[in-house]
């Protein structure tokens, strides 16, 4: 066995962390979440996606694979992604609630307007023809 720390082909950490094992010296994480509107949540997240992320939507699920050279970098990227995911999900949920409330108010307004048209007492029928 050699005293050379890289003689066996392992990666050398440059940020004080233990090197990643395997070819290329990278760490990976897979995050799969399900959502009522996965396409919309993924679209809301897209501006924050980095080159280290591969995201795809599969039905009601978002699959995100993150690959970073260090464990600390991977942890940081996963943490950022999960925080952004929670915010996007909340925004989509609130938008859905407001859209539902707006439709309900719109339906009430339409119904009130129809009732007003049917019971308007200021309208007189011309009987002098």
Image: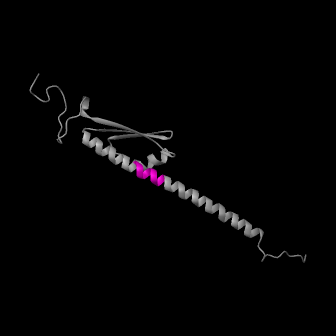
Task: Tell me the residue at 56%/57% (across/down).
Answer: 99
Q: In the rendered view of the protein, which quadrant contains the C terminus? A: bottom right
Is residue 88 magenta-colored? yes
Q: Position of residue 68 (x, y in %)?
A: 28, 39
Q: Position of residue 64 (x, y in %)?
A: 39, 40
Q: Is residue 66 above or below residue 92?
A: above
Task: Tell me the residue at 82%/76% (across/down).
Answer: 124
Can the viewer see residue 47?
no
Task: Tell me the residue at 41%/50% (across/down).
Answer: 86
Q: Residue furthest top?
A: 1
Task: Tell me the residue at 79%/75% (across/down).
Answer: 123
Q: Position of residue 102 (x, y in %)?
A: 58, 60
Is residue 7 magenta-colored? no
Q: Name the one closer to the observer, 48 or 21.
A: 21
Q: Is residue 82 above or below residue 91?
A: above
Q: Is residue 94 above or below residue 3?
A: below
Q: Position of residue 106 (x, y in %)?
A: 63, 62
Q: Is residue 63 above or below residue 7?
A: below
Q: Is residue 72 left or right of residue 43?
A: left
Can the viewer see residue 76?
yes
- The stretch in magenta equals 85-92
Q: Main secondary structure of the magenta part?
A: helix
Asked which colour scheme the image uses, the reply is one colour
Q: In the rendered view of the protein, which quadrant contains the N terminus? A: top left
């Amino acid at each position: 066995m050699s005293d050379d720390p890289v003689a066996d082909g392992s990666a050398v950490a440059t940020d004080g962390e233990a090197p990643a094992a395997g070819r290329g010296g990278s760490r990976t994480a897979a995050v799969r979440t399900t959502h009522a509107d996965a396409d919309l949540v993924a679209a809301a997240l897209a501006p924050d996606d980095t080159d280290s992320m591969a995201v795809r939507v599969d039905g009601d699920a978002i699959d995100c694979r993150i690959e970073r050279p260090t464990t600390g970098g991977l942890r940081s990227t996963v943490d950022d992604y999960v925080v952004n995911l929670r915010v996007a999900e909340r925004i989509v949920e609130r938008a859905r609630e407001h859209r539902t409330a707006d439709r309900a108010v719109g339906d009430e307004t339409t119904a009130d307007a129809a009732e007003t048209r049917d019971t308007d007492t200021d309208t007189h029928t011309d009987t002098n023809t």
